[in-house]
Image (cartoon, grey):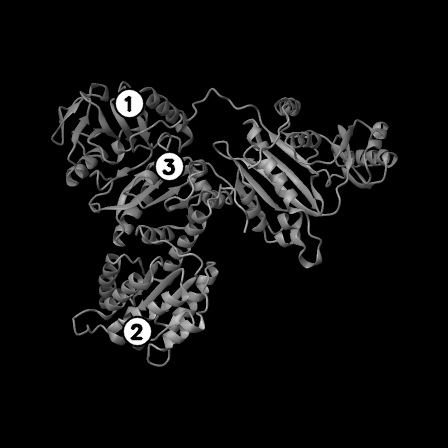
Amino acid sequence: MEAVEMDPDLDRLLAAAAAEVLARDGNTLPEDRSKQVLASAGLAVPRSVVVDSADEAARADSLTAPLVVKALGATLVHKSDAGGVVLGVVDAAAAAHAIRQVDAGVRAAGHIPERFLVEEQAGRGVEIILGATRQPGGAWAVMIGLGGVWTEMLEDVGVGVAPLTRPEVHGIIDGLRGAGLLHGARGSAPVDVESLVAQIVRFAGVDGLLTRLPDWVEAVDVNPIVVTATGSTAVDASIVVGPPADSSGTARAEPVATDFSRLLEPKSVAVVGASARQPNLGNAFLDQLRAGEFGGRIVVVHPTAETVDGHVTVPSLRELDEPVDYAYITLPAPQVAPALTGADGRVGFAQVISSGFGEIEAGGEREAELSRIAVRERIRVLGPNCLGTFSPTGRISFVSDPPSEPGSVAFVSQSGGLSVDVIRLGAARGISFRAVVSLGNAIDVRPAELLDHFLADPDTAVVAFYLESIEAGLELLEMLRGRGPHKPVILLAGGRTSAGSTAASSHTGALAANEKVWPAIARQAGIVLVDDLGELLNCLEVFHFRDVRIAAGGGVVLFGNGGGTSVLASDALARAGLRVPLLPDDVLAGLAAIGLPPGNGLANPIDIPARSMIVDDGRVAKDILNVIHTGAKPGTVITHVNIGVIPATPDANGDDLVENVIRAVAAARDETGAGTPHLIVLRSDQRPITQGRAQHCAEVARGLGIPVFAEIPDAIAACRGLVAYHAATAYPADQERQRI
């Protein structure tokens, strides 16, 4: 990306303007000061003069008419509404009259004008709104939209996270519903889009204005930028400031190089808070270690008892005779920080299950104290307010009777309850886990650190997250910037609406953000963003098979029995933005040559009744799909079977006919469909016999490396995730490239 030449006086200019505004108990820099800041970053603004009264209007003689006159004042945020703007002023003499006019108008509206801005009026063009708001953690969310009614009534805006590359800016602009107006739609004159992109890059690019603004600048609004056939000009602007940040608080420490095997596969565990009298969460954790056949050293920390549940105790962490990898802390919140005092490097990770920290108003200082002591004692903290770690290879778990088979899915969650749901529901679908980590408030160990670990871990195929903190999401984006193609990363974000953000605040202390910021994070980071738990599980169903990748450009072929089902599935695919292309004539001819019974629809969706589906005891599916693979080169194939209408009578070999269909799908995939992912939907009428067949056939399919779904919308959600992943990793978001 091109570097932006920045005025070296920007910091001085900002500080002086902010001090002037804050001294009057205001928070918004006036338009002339705001435009000076924009100009210092290379953004085009109108030539102008600022005068104290109409008597100074002659200073506007150097400007080229037509001119605009605007009143400036601490309370004049919406100048036009207060009668503080006059357009089409023809010369300096007319400017004097206009100044008197706006002076009287804004005073009548209850405002006191302080100065008057006279500037050259921009030509007619397309109005664009450009704004940026500071996010938790300091990042900037940048909004780009068409001005006027497009923003006010239609909310036609796109959002990105700075710094933005030129391709990202183009992508946001092209995604606006009214983008055609920039290119001459409906007889309008096309405008200079490249000049607009250049303005936005100077504003939000890697070396742009936003990177230079101090942390006490909270928002910047450029509204509008007028884009004409010959350029772009920022004709109004405001900068919102606050008092300088208090640096005396406890900032989150920078992550240190950490051996996460001590968290995920500990060789020694200390349990702090188990009771010698009344079983509690600490005792339950000891039971789970025993049931999981944990083979490492177990130490119980208890101030008075000599043994707890058969384990010898030590009075405190400072009295450990040798370090432990993982300490499970189940003490009341006020006792947690004191319990870590004196550990002095003897504990690798302290997982704090206790609540009562930053997720409640009274717990902020307690959380800060925990952070300070953990840094001092050289302990990495997991939580607080979290369930901890489930690791089949490490033999540790926060759920009873956990699945024991190690797998390739890593899941990191700010919700403990959702972590349990993912483990249980995932196991029911044959999904095995590399690890599940419940982070809670995540005051120390951060989701981005775990992402970095799992991306480098050869035993992990896909990493999924449930996050409530926009700051954590922005850290994922920062982690993935510059990496290029990476493993699938799936994100379920809580608190994307105003109602959800309120709930998230009370759950984990997460801060709210514009609902458009999460999709921007996902788009720029190459993350698959899902809307609910079911969609998350559907994506895990696909991605935990390591060799499942979308084939480029071929669309979706739908194959199965049930005419109405096929029609509804086609509608659902279209709503999901997935193509269902018609099959070429040579493919149709090849399908016809198979000799199926009459009554089939072969165009795509391929709709064949049950009598056709069981030709050759179901093995005809291989012939059908070989023709599809060879001639149509599909991106994805979804095979759906209504099990209830397929005879339950086995074939001559005693095999279920649906099982034969599944094996035929796998055989065709292996023979002619290399690189094409296959998804199977096994639809049940919920009768016990059908449910039993569905369960058995699902196990067969998964054993053959084919993801299985209960309904077609589930498969479509997974397919949409595949397409999103392919699109994100085929063209890394932060890489400069020619637009095609």
For label 2, the SS is helix
Q: Earlier in the sequence, mark 1 or mark 3?
A: 1
* Of the two numbered discs 1 and 3 in the rendering, the one whose residue sits closer to the viewer: 3
Residue occupied by mark 2: 613
Q: Looking at the image, do the residues carrying marks 1 and 2 touch, with CB atoms under 8 Å apart? A: no
**How crowded is the residue under tag 3: few (<14 C-alpha within 10 Å), some, or many (20+)?**
many
Q: Quadrant of residue 697?
A: bottom left
**Residue at the spot x=27%, y=56% of the render?**
705
**Residue at the spot x=63%, y=21% of the render?**
12
Q: Quadrant of residue 277?
A: top left
Q: Earlier in the sequence, mark 1 or mark 2?
A: 1
Q: Quadrant of residue 83?
A: top right
Q: Is residue 54 visible?
A: no
Q: Describe residue 699's horizontal placement relative to residue 465 as left or right.
A: left
**Residue furthest left in the image:** 310
- CA separation in Å, label 1 and label 2: 65 Å
Q: Earlier in the sequence, mark 2 or mark 3?
A: 3
For label 1, the SS is helix
Where is residue 65 drawn, in percent x and y? Answer: 82, 39
For label 3, the SS is helix
**How crowded is the residue under tag 1: few (<14 C-alpha within 10 Å), some, or many (20+)?**
many
Q: Describe residue 312's horizontal placement relative to residue 658 as left or right.
A: left
Q: Tag count in the figure?
A: 3
Residue occupied by mark 3: 447
**Residue furthest right in the image:** 93
Q: What amino acid is at disc 1?
A: Leu
Residue occupied by mark 1: 340
Where is residue 552 drawn, in percent x and y? Answer: 43, 56
Examine the rendered structure and indicate whether residue 200 appears above or below residue 620.
above
- CA separation in Å, label 2 and label 3: 47 Å
Q: What amino acid is at disc 3?
A: Pro
Q: Describe residue 205's horizontal placement relative to residue 182 as left or right.
A: left
